[in-house]
Amino acid sequence: MRKGEETRERILEIAESSVLAKGFGATSIEEIIAEAGITKSGFFYHFKDKNELARALMLRYVEMEDRIFDEAFHRGRQLSDDPLQAFLITLKLLAELMNDLPNGHPGCLVATFVYQERLFDREVRELTTDTVRKWSERFRAALAGVAEAYPPRDTIDINDVGDMFCCVVDGGIIMSRAIGDPGVLQRQILAFRGFVKVLFTPAAQAAMPRPAAVAVAAE
């Protein structure tokens, strides 16, 4: 990576950390410059104003999250040809990923931008809206494939179930930060996974008694 690219990436890292910690409005260009160790002209070489910084932050964040989703969905399909099992595996992988983060998920940049939408120009607001729709559509499409093979056991709009994942993640992040428990997000994703499993597991299969545990005698 060239020096100019390294400087730009450093600015974005500092800005994202600050925005997630205290919001976009409270994040100043001056503090970013000071922490990055650059001049004001150095900052404006990369970003003409704060809205351009916001667009770059969002695009960087979306690219990272898309990569995580792509890898999890791909791995799920690799491990099972069954659409329900593949989706359940995907959710388990995402939950494990959240649990592996040392201090929990740092926060949702999309949610932060939505809460402070008046600070942004129309392009940034549209980018934020399109991002939420795209992520919901990803999960809606996966669940539609599951529903074709396993009709849901309750009358429910599959699109609403797809949207639910985004609600679970954002809600899990908020609750995790509010009560200081990094494990909340992982548990909420696993709870959503349990709901999906119950919703699509055929009634006859769900009613079957579980096999009793077999004790192994010590030799």
Image: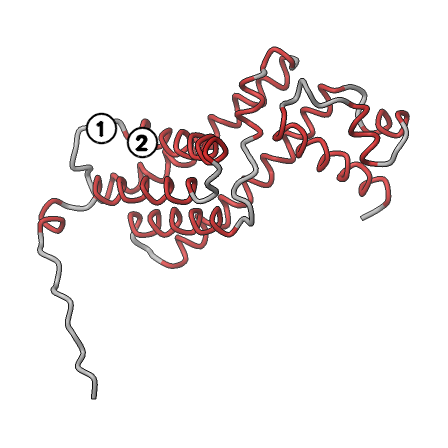
Kindly identify which numbered label has been placed on residue 34: none
Marks 2 and 1, how far apart in space? 8 Å
Residue in the image at 64% along x and 31% along y: 59
Q: In the image, what residue type sits under mark 1?
A: Ile
Secondary-structure class at tag 2: helix
Residue 114 at x, y = what percent?
Answer: 54, 19
Residue 42 at x, y = what percent?
Answer: 88, 30
Residue in the image at 52% along x and 21% along y: 129
Furthest-front residue in view?
A: 179
In the rendered view, does 159 fall on the left or right side of 156?
A: right
Residue 126 at x, y = what percent?
Answer: 57, 18
Residue 175 at x, y = what percent?
Answer: 44, 32
Using a 10 Å C-alpha cutoff, classify the residue at mark 2 as few (fewer than 14 neighbours), some (14 to 19) or many (20 or more). Answer: some
Q: Which residue is mark 2?
A: 161
Q: Which of the colour schemes (rainbow, by chain, secondary structure, one colour) is used?
A: secondary structure
Q: Nearer the viewer, residue 26 or 157?
A: 26
Residue in the image at 65% along x and 35% along y: 60
Asked if labels 1 and 2 touch by Cβ distance under 8 angstroms, the answer is: yes
Q: In the image, what residue type sits under mark 2?
A: Val
In the rendered view, does 28 fall on the left or right side of 43?
A: left
Using a 10 Å C-alpha cutoff, classify the residue at mark 1 as few (fewer than 14 neighbours), some (14 to 19) or many (20 or more). Answer: few
In the rendered view, does 211 fall on the left or right side of 101?
A: left
Q: Quadrant of the C terminus?
A: bottom left
Secondary-structure class at tag 1: loop
In the rendered view, does 58 fall on the left or right side of 48?
A: left
Query: Which of the two discs, 2 and 1, labels the residue nearer the N terminus?
Result: 1
Q: Nearer the viewer, residue 26 or 43?
A: 26
Kindly identify which numbered label has been placed on residue 156: 1
Instruction: In the rendered view, tell whether residue 189 sits above or below residue 86.
Output: above
Furthest-bottom residue in view?
A: 219
